[in-house]
Image (tube, rainbow, N blue to C red):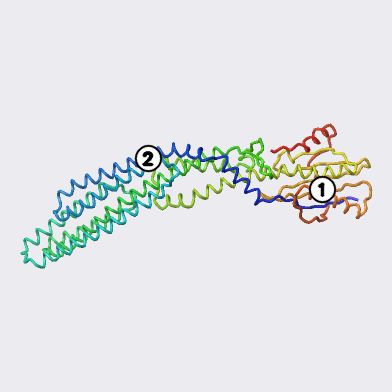
Amino acid sequence: MSGHKRTTVTISEEEYRKLHEAQMSDRFSEGRKNEILQSIRQETQHVLQNHIMNVDFRQKDYQKSLNEISDDLYFLEETTNQSILSQNRIFETQIEGLSIDVRSGMENLVEQQSLFYENLLTEERKRQNEFNYSLQEKFSNLELDREEKSSIAIESLRSVKELAVFIENSYPLRFDQKPILEGFQRRINQAELNLNSGLSESTITQAQQLFMDLSDERILLEKLEMQWNLLLQTAREKASYLLQFAKDQQNVFAIYPDGKTLPYTLDVDFWNGGAYATFIDYVNQLNEQLQSPGAYVELSVLEDLIKITFPELENELDSLIFNTRMKAIQSQMRINIADIVLQAFFEQGYNLQAASYEAEDPRLRFEARLRHISGSEVVVQVDPGNGCDPRNDLHLFSLDQEVLTSHELHQRSREIRQALCSHGLELGATSTQPMNFTPVVQIDGKNEKRLRSEIADDRTY
């Protein structure tokens, strides 16, 4: 009586993931992480020190420009300048500390520096308002003739132009500030028209507001420059680290379900059907783009890379490694499951005829074929689940020449289930399936001894 029975055999994915995570932690120790980060961090320090140098140069250049503006405005801007220079000295100390604690996050520096510039902007605006208020009081208490008002308007507008020229010449046009600068120029042109029309008081009011806005823009651009440099280096660090980390994982040790690390390495790319190589190519291209001299990546893109893309890539790499181990242990389980089933059949007088993986690929189905002295045949097939599904489907095809009763078939099924359960394997329900048998292996008596030995070994592929 021929027939086809199917049951599902499972190992716990949750428990196996814990073993995987523990092994990953042991394998890629803190020492190795620090070794990779140390080389990356040296480049980060060099780039950020150059950034600080450029900020210092800009403040010194601006100090020279301040000589062309009024004394009151000079004092206001000089105070802001000194605040930036003092903050740079603090920043330098923080950068030096990066080499001591290489695990410290660059994100903390971004937050600290951003907060400084936000506070500076608030303080600058407060000082500007106080200055403008005192200037208005001065005008209201003095009776100025037209010529004196015109002189003040001309000086105020000249200060505005000096600051506008400095901003345009000192900051790279990478924050889409061109439309903003064009807007400032239109306002300056309008103020000049008012001045030429004899509207001195209107010109003074416009110049005051323009200078405040331009001063705010200068601080904002310093902040954006700082953020961009820090975020770019953060992204570069993460890309370099991820690439090196991923390359170190090309071959990983197998882990048996009992937590034992086996002395066999697994090719991550092979077990994931080329997905690892695709992953490495993508990270490598991303790293090259970020490391390219003169590379420009928008701030919003850098933020997305750091907050979203890199964490997703780290999870993807971990999944590739876990999938490798899970698929390999599943492959081994298919042999072990088949071996347990075969032992049950050996006790019933069956002999092994042939056994192998489909296409000799350990990622695919494992099949064994047995024959009884009576001429009856049984084929044992253990199919992998889809992807990393921890379940294996066990198929028993009975190609019996002798007639077995339904009771005898069920009895054989129970014996096999008991044998599998005794080895701690989780079993699903057994069901009778339509007979749809396509053999994977052909009978080859000469290979019987070799194949039998292969099944008995506790090997990992």
**Above or below — where is 12 with respect to 129?**
above
- Identified at 80% across, 52% down, the residue is 6
Position of residue 266 measured from the top left corner of the image (x, y, whole percent) = 64, 38
Q: Is residue 446 left or right of residue 33?
A: right
Mark 2 neighbour class, 10 Å CA radius: few under 14, some 14 to 19, many 20 or more: some
Q: Is residue 170 left or right of residue 350?
A: left
The Cα atoms of the two marked residues, 1 and 2, are separated by 63 Å
Which residue lies most toward the top here?
A: 446
Looking at this view, is 239 or 93 the one in front? 93
Which mark is drawn over residue 229? none
Which residue lies most toward the bottom here?
A: 140
Position of residue 219 measured from the top left corner of the image (x, y, whole percent) = 28, 53
Q: Nearer the viewer, mark 1 or mark 2?
A: 1
Looking at this view, is 433 or 318 the one in front? 318
Q: Looking at the image, tell me whether mark 1 or mark 2 is earlier in sequence order.
A: 2
Looking at this view, is 335 or 203 the one in front? 335
Which mark is drawn over residue 45? 2
Disc 1 marks a residue whose amino acid type is: Ala
Which element type, helix, strand or loop, lies under badge 2?
helix
Which element type, helix, strand or loop, lies under badge 1?
helix
- Identified at 31% across, 43% down, the residue is 52
Position of residue 454 measured from the top left corner of the image (x, y, whole percent) = 77, 36
Q: Which residue is mark 1?
A: 419
**Above or below — where is 249 with respect to 422?**
above
Is disc 1 in contact with disc 2, using a CB cutoff of under 8 Å?
no
- Identified at 81% across, 41% down, the residue is 368
Disc 2 marks a residue whose amino acid type is: Gln
Position of residue 81 measured from the top left corner of the image (x, y, whole percent) = 23, 49
Q: How many marks?
A: 2
Q: In the picture, which quadrant includes the C terminus? A: top right
Mark 1 neighbour class, 10 Å CA radius: few under 14, some 14 to 19, many 20 or more: some
